[in-house]
Image (cartoon, grey):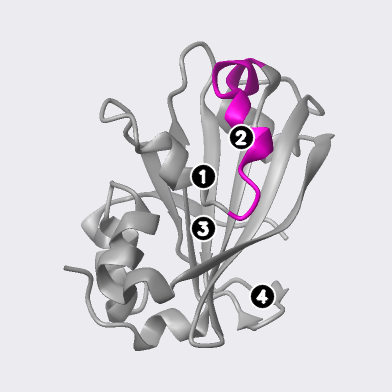
Amino acid sequence: MKHAWRPLTAAALRCLPARLRPWLADCGSLTAALRRTLGEALECRLQAQGWRRATADEAARLGLGAGSALFWRRVRFSHAGRTLLIGHTLAPPAALAAWPALRRLGDRPVGELLFADPTVQRARIELAVTPLMEPADSGPVVAARRALVPTGRQPLLVMEHFLPAMLHLPVPP
């Protein structure tokens, strides 16, 4: 399904559930924000990883040719038996060369690796502001964001798909 991605602005945030706005607007590590809120009870599990071809949208966002090879990683964040969000990381070969540890993260979130470097920041955050009809294992996606994360010669694309359980979390500290 093609998403309607829009830059992170106040207007774009107003189109999304109010309870998610602080989470969506946070430019730092979402993993760190979730850990500040939920503590060590936050679970991250690797769902899949490997190589695949970039979609036209992904390739354009990363400045690559359509069909370029990407290292892809999907993780599930949960708390107290409820899935909160699904995270995806897309790494072109040049980004993977800059961050080879991406292949060996296992159940660790990519944010722990990337944001351990204080110079790393998200760039060009976008939000999906239309309802996402793609079902997840734990319900429909209620909001999504994606951002480039500079890694030297080639950025990564990091995406988070927020599930209904996120609507019940307290506002991040």
When asked about the image quadrant of residue 61, the answer is top right
Element type where label 4 sits in the image: loop
The x, y position of residue 128, in whole percent, is: 49, 59
The x, y position of residue 79, in whole percent, is: 47, 80
Q: CA distance from mark 1 to mark 4?
A: 26 Å
Q: CA distance from mark 4 to mark 3?
A: 15 Å
Q: Are marks 4 and 3 in contact (CB under 8 Å)?
A: no
Q: CA distance from mark 3 to mark 1?
A: 12 Å
Q: Are marks 1 and 2 in contact (CB under 8 Å)?
A: yes
Q: CA distance from mark 1 to mark 2?
A: 7 Å
Front residue of 141 and 39 = 39
Element type where label 3 sits in the image: strand
Q: Nearer the viewer, mark 1 or mark 4?
A: 1
Lateral position of residue 61 relative to residue 12, left or right:
right
* Three-letter amino acid code of the residue under disc 4: Met
Residue shown at the point (55%, 37%) measured from the top left? 157
Number of marks in picture: 4
* Crowd band around label 2 with a 10 angstrom C-alpha radius: few (<14), some (14–19), many (20+): many
Check the picture and name the quadrant holding the N terminus: bottom right
Magenta span main SS: helix
Mark 4 or mark 2, which is nearer the start of the sequence? 2
The x, y position of residue 68, in whole percent, is: 78, 24
Which residue carries the number 4 mark? 133
Q: CA distance from mark 3 to mark 2?
A: 17 Å
* Three-letter amino acid code of the residue under disc 3: Glu
- Numbered circle sitting on residue 160: 3
Mark 2 or mark 3, which is nearer the start of the sequence? 2
**Residue segment shown in magenta:** 94-107
Which residue carries the number 1 mark? 110
- Numbered circle sitting on residue 102: 2
* Crowd band around label 3 with a 10 angstrom C-alpha radius: few (<14), some (14–19), many (20+): many
Q: Nearer the viewer, mark 4 or mark 3?
A: 3
